[in-house]
Image (cartoon, grey):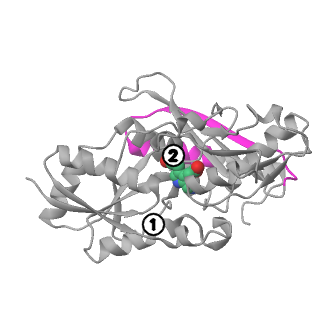
């Protein structure tokens, strides 16, 4: 059955790329799909760190209002920006195949941290990247390097780099690749060097759940787009964030990968997580575990176990999780 569908999307170049990507996939299934562009608070507030003004939810709330009012049928999000708990009545109907989940180093000047000139400034605004960069700089004995906040959409961030406000910036590789900007990447950090954020590089499709025939048809169409191995990986990662009470004001990394590839049903999923102290007094705290994962429940149970380990390790290190 062919449907007329509307996708609610933010209007940044990356958000539009992502919405158009899903539009294309749904059109291939014979549906008529239009986009409804909107500006969210997260796009408007650019002068303050997101962690200080309410966090990830700021990027998704307006889109949920559009779903609630029936102005749109689905919303496409970078999963990294989707809060762990969706409001009552909303569900994640599909997670698409993951793009590169790693972080990228972009710099016209140097190939990596070790090459930074004395007193260099590195831009990033994610607290996770701040604590991981700090750890790497500490290992290199580079206490001269400064990490400074950097906000705005991808184009804005790159412009600030090009204007010379920073020697280098760290961004998600996925966003750069999607926008055809992969040539700007000087180096991609391995997950060992810089553990990615929960859900980074994956797209999630959110809908308003309802017991109607229309919703059932929509869920069916979206389930055709879902990529199960990605879904299992991000379910484990997001379970860590959820159990840690993670908002974007917590410097938290969580990354899962199948140890045997490709990932058949029941393959072993390895999950690693890290927490850092924003004040920089404590060394990075890490935890990891692995499990045979057959479904979302197994993935979430793994995430919960790693979160418990991490919480215990944070306590032993003398850290506090409530900031
Ligand atoms: N926090 C903003 C955001 N949300 C998703 C991406 C990149 C794409 C992705 O991770 O899927 C970015 C930019 C970045 O972190 O550099």
In the image, 111: left or right of 42? right
Place of residue 112 in the rendered image (x, y in percent of width and height, measured from the top left): 75, 33
Quadrant of residue 294 within the rendered picture: top left
Magenta segment boundaries in residue numbering: 280-307
Answer above or below: position of 161 versus 68.
Answer: above
Place of residue 301 in the rendered image (x, y in percent of width and height, measured from the top left): 49, 45
Q: Mark 1 or 2 closer to N-term?
A: 1
At a point 67% along the width and 63% down the height, the residue shown is 249
Answer above or below: position of 55 versus 159.
Answer: below
Which quarter shows the C terminus? bottom right
Question: Of 218 and 297, which appears nearest the observer?
Answer: 218
The answer to whether residue 199 shows anywhere in this view is no
According to the picture, the residue beneath numbered tag 1 turns out to be 60
* Mark 1 sits near ligand 1, with its Cβ under 8 Å away: no
Mark 2, Cα crowd under 10 Å, few <14 / some 14-19 / many 20+, is many
At a point 51% along the width and 67% down the height, the residue shown is 57
Residue 286 badge: none
Mark 1, Cα crowd under 10 Å, few <14 / some 14-19 / many 20+, is many
73 within the magenta span: no
Mark 1 vs mark 2, CA separation in Å? 18 Å
Badge 1 element: loop
Dot in front, 1 or 2: 2
In the image, 294: left or right of 184? left
According to the picture, the residue beneath numbered tag 2 turns out to be 175
Place of residue 66 in the rendered image (x, y in percent of width and height, measured from the top left): 33, 73
Badge 2 element: helix
* Mark 2 sits near ligand 1, with its Cβ under 8 Å away: yes
């Amino acid at each position: 059955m062919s449907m007329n569908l509307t996708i609610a999307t933010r209007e940044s170049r990356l958000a539009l790329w992502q919405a158009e990507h899903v539009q294309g996939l749904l059109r291939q299934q014979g549906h008529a799909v239009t986009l409804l562009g909107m500006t969210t608070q997260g796009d408007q507030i650019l002068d303050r760190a997101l962690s200080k003004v309410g966090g990830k939810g700021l990027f998704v709330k307006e889109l949920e209002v559009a779903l609630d009012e029936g102005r749109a049928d689905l919303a496409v999000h970078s999963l990294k920006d989707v809060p762990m708990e969706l409001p009552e009545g909303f569900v994640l109907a599909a997670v698409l195949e993951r793009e590169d989940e790693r972080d990228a180093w972009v710099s016209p000047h140097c190939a990596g941290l070790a090459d930074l000139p004395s007193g260099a400034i590195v831009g990033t605004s994610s607290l996770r990247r701040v604590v991981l960069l700090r750890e790497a700089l500490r290992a290199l004995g580079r206490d001269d390097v400064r990490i400074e906040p950097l906000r705005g959409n991808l184009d804005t961030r790159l412009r600030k780099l090009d204007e010379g406000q920073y020697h280098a910036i760290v961004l998600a590789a996925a966003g750069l690749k999607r926008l055809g900007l992969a040539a700007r990447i000087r180096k991609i950090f391995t997950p060992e060097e810089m553990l990615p954020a929960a859900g980074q590089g994956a797209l999630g499709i959110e809908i308003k759940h309802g017991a109607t025939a229309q919703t059932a048809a929509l869920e069916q169409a979206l389930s055709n787009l879902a990529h199960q191995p990605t879904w299992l990986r991000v379910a484990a990662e997001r379970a860590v964030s959820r159990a840690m009470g993670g908002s974007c004001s917590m410097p938290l990394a969580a990354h899962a990968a199948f140890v045997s590839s490709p990932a058949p049903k029941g393959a072993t999923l390895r999950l690693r997580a890290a927490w850092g102290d924003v004040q920089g007094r404590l060394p990075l705290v890490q935890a990891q575990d692995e499990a045979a994962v057959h479904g979302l429940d197994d993935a979430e149970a793994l995430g919960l176990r790693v979160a418990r380990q991490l919480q215990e390790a944070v306590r032993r290190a003398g850290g506090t999780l409530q900031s």
